[in-house]
Image (cartoon, rainbow, N blue to C red):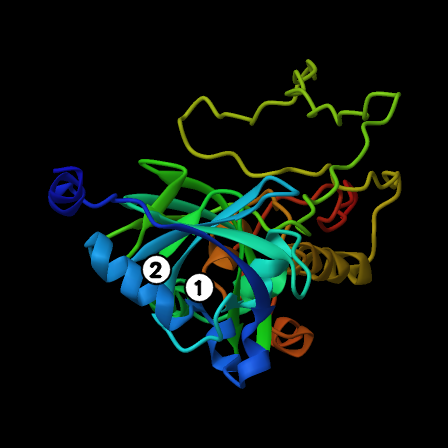
Amino acid sequence: MALEEEIYRDPPSTFEQNYRCYPVSFIEKSHLEKGDKIIMPPSALDRLAYLQIDYPMLFELKNPFASKVSHCGVLEFIADEGLIYIPYWMMENMLLQEGDIVNVKNASLSKGTYVKLQPHTMDFLDISNPKAILETSLRSYSCLTTGDTIMVSYNNKKFYIDIVETKPSPAVSIIETDCEVDFAPPLDYKEPERPLKSKTPPEVEEEPANKIPKFNPFSGSARRLDGKPAEPVTAPPVQPQKTEATTSDTTASVPSSSGSRKRSGKLVFGSNADQNSNAAPKATMKEAKQDSPKKEEPKFQAFTGKKYSLKN
């Protein structure tokens, strides 16, 4: 009766076993360093099949001496009995050395919805499209654990990235799931230094105030009573009057002086002003001398007449 109960009893649903761990490079499978897959012995497969473990098979790895925990998937069951081979970066995360004991236990993880990553160096951000490279690299991973440091290889260069946060749980499965990825500033990122504020406040240049115009007497424009625009007038030079009658040479000099005043652009008094205003402004000295004094209209000249005597 007891034997029948043991046969029909539901098998346990938990797989848990201790193994000695070694890097995957020991079995010439260095390509497994670009992921989180491990190699287990054939006896583990028989035990897992008997327990009817759901696929994909995910496991929790634990260092019993350092309380370090990580998660992984399995690729093959070809290891020697009592041994497992795991990527070297996982051994570093769990502080494991070659031949150390590691506890392996099957795990059921929720599908990830959010992951926050933090590169170790700024070089990772120099890649033309880091998100595309990361998406391609994460296809080799089965799960992510908060606190782990994964390795991404690109152009023969290794980039280490910390798993800062995962949702909805500290460990998530990333197999066939849409997961939002966010980046934290790299570990070697330094904010630009702000200039130190000087103790003395910077001198502020005062804008020149609008100058108030000063009062200048008699600075307006001149106006005439007849409404015509006024022209600037300069007083002619004062000449001493001659008490004696001038000769005919003096008479001839008057029109020449008036002509010189008209050519200089000054205002000339007398009847000749209207006639001279119609003349071309660029008249030469030669043309002015050719004008005969007989053609000009007579004007009043003091003491320029002929002499008369009361005697016959």
Considering only vertical position in the picture, is 78 above or below 56?
A: below
206 vs 120, left or right, is right
> Residue at (54%, 83%) from the top-left corner?
27
> Residue at (13%, 39%) from the top-left corner?
5
> Where residue 115 sits: x, y (%)?
38, 46
Q: CA distance from mark 2 to mark 1?
A: 7 Å
296 vs 248, left or right, is left
What residue does disc 1 label? 36
Quarter assignment of residue 290:
bottom right
User: Judging from the image, what secondary structure is the residue with disc 2 in?
Assistant: loop
Residue type, mark 1 in image: Asp
Considering only vertical position in the picture, is 276 above or below 219?
A: below
Residue type, mark 2 in image: Ser
Label 2 neighbour load within 10 Å: few <14, some 14-19, many 20+: many
5 vs 57, left or right, is left
Q: Which mark is residue 142?
A: 2
Q: Is residue 120 visible?
A: no
> Residue at (42%, 33%) from the top-left corner?
228
Q: Is residue 204 visible?
A: yes
Marks 1 and 2: in contact by CB < 8 Å? yes
Considering only vertical position in the picture, is 207 above or below 64?
A: above
> Where residue 20 sits: x, y (%)?
58, 62
The extreme front residue here reads 1
The extreme bottom residue here reads 28
